Image (cartoon, rainbow, N blue to C red):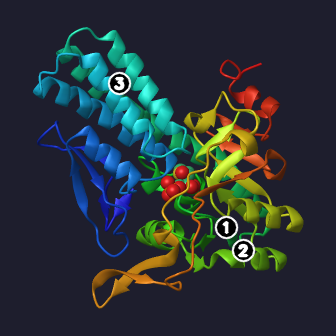
Amino acid sequence: MKINQQYYRSIWLHPQDKKVVQIIDQRSLPHAFVIRDVKTVAEGVYAIKEMLVRGAPLIGAMAAYSMYLATLEAHQQQVADVAAFLQQAATNLLASRPTAVNLHWAVQRQQAAIGLAKSIDEKMTVALQTAQDICEEDVEICRMIGVHGLPLLTAISKQKKGDTVNILTHCNAGWIATVDWGTATSPIYQAHEKGIKVHVWVDETRPRNQGARLTAWELAEHGVPHTVIVDNAGGHLMQHGLVDICIVGTDRTTYTGDVANKIGTYLKALAAKDNGVPFYVALPSTTIDWQMRDGLKEIPIEQRRASEVTHIQGLHEGEIKQVQLTPTNSAAANFAFDVTPARLVTGLITERGICAASEQGIASLFPKTTLA
Ligand code: MRU
């Protein structure tokens, strides 16, 4: 998508040096646009852990490129046991963030591809190709999520006789969380391009404010009308008929349709249910966990450091600063995700179409992959 009229993706290979991966450092957005080089698997792990890159599909893409960087390192360092070196790289990547299943999916796909290659030269070539394939596929998948989600917005627009469609979203499931297009934002961008009047309620999404910082920034860059709201406002807006539809992303969806997404998503789904507002989850199939049945019991929920709650980041006199919010001696808990049970989800918007959030619904679109 475009930033300041220039086309970008969220991750790419350095145009002059294919041993370097480049990313947009999302920690400093929207106040500073910083591109960072990632040259080693350790830097890739750091980028995921510290959330220079975040969002399930982009975490997967970063992990895939990091496995490629690991093959380059194995070559440069002339390591004796390449398999052990690459296994350690995979283990470190898998430990970087626990909830987004795309990380596991991408690392496993790389391991399978690299494992078939015999020489280290061949491994480097295959790993680069696989990382690039994963990125290209993600772009197309996200575009198709938009294609399938668009009719939902068109129908509401028609029902409202062309009046503005009000969409509420949580966190950032935008293009910056994927390689391009985004998941929840893809139908919104496509509707906006088609001239359908849309307006997005952007949950700020404490503690890291992905909504206020990233979703608002993306939408502003594209001229999509939007309003940032505090996380507690959604219920009130729904009670007063100011939300036509909720669309959120997900980090891991069980094959039965339970959805793990940014903390606070569950409360929005509850409010939506109580007010008869449709609640959709947009996801690439790479976010479906084919091994997990019960989201509440099985999905690992990341707990991050307390300082993300006790402190808040913002711009002060031209500089990005952290300020303390809470009393110095107050403890803080930082659960990064929650699980919305399938029964609260109106439908899943995938690259193959929209389905019910249920084992049957998912199996109807992805028949071969679903477990019995
Ligand atoms: O902690 P984050 O910022 O990585 O969490 C991101 C989300 O919760 C997104 O909604 C999810 O990854 C979907 S991204 C298309």
Could you tell me residue 73's position as x and y percent? 18, 30
* Location of the C terminus (image quadrant): top right
Measured in 3D between alpha carbons, the distance from the residue under mark 3 to the one under mark 2, in whole angstroms, is 44 Å
Amino acid marked by disc 1: Leu
Q: In this figure, which residue is indicated by the disc labeled 2? A: 234
Measured in 3D between alpha carbons, the distance from the residue under mark 3 to the one under mark 1, in whole angstroms, is 41 Å
Q: Judge: label 1 CB < 8 Å from ligand 1.
A: no
Could you tell me residue 76's position as x and y percent? 11, 28
| 266 to the left or right of 4 | right
Residue 82 to residue 273: above or below: above
Residue 69, quarter of the rendered image? top left
- Residue furthest toward the bottom? 317
Q: In this figure, which residue is indicated by the disc labeled 3? A: 87
Whether residue 259 is visible here, answered yes or no, is yes
Amino acid marked by disc 2: Gly
**Are the residues flagged by discs 2 and 1 in contact, CB closer than 8 Å?**
yes
Could you tell me residue 60's position as x and y percent? 44, 39
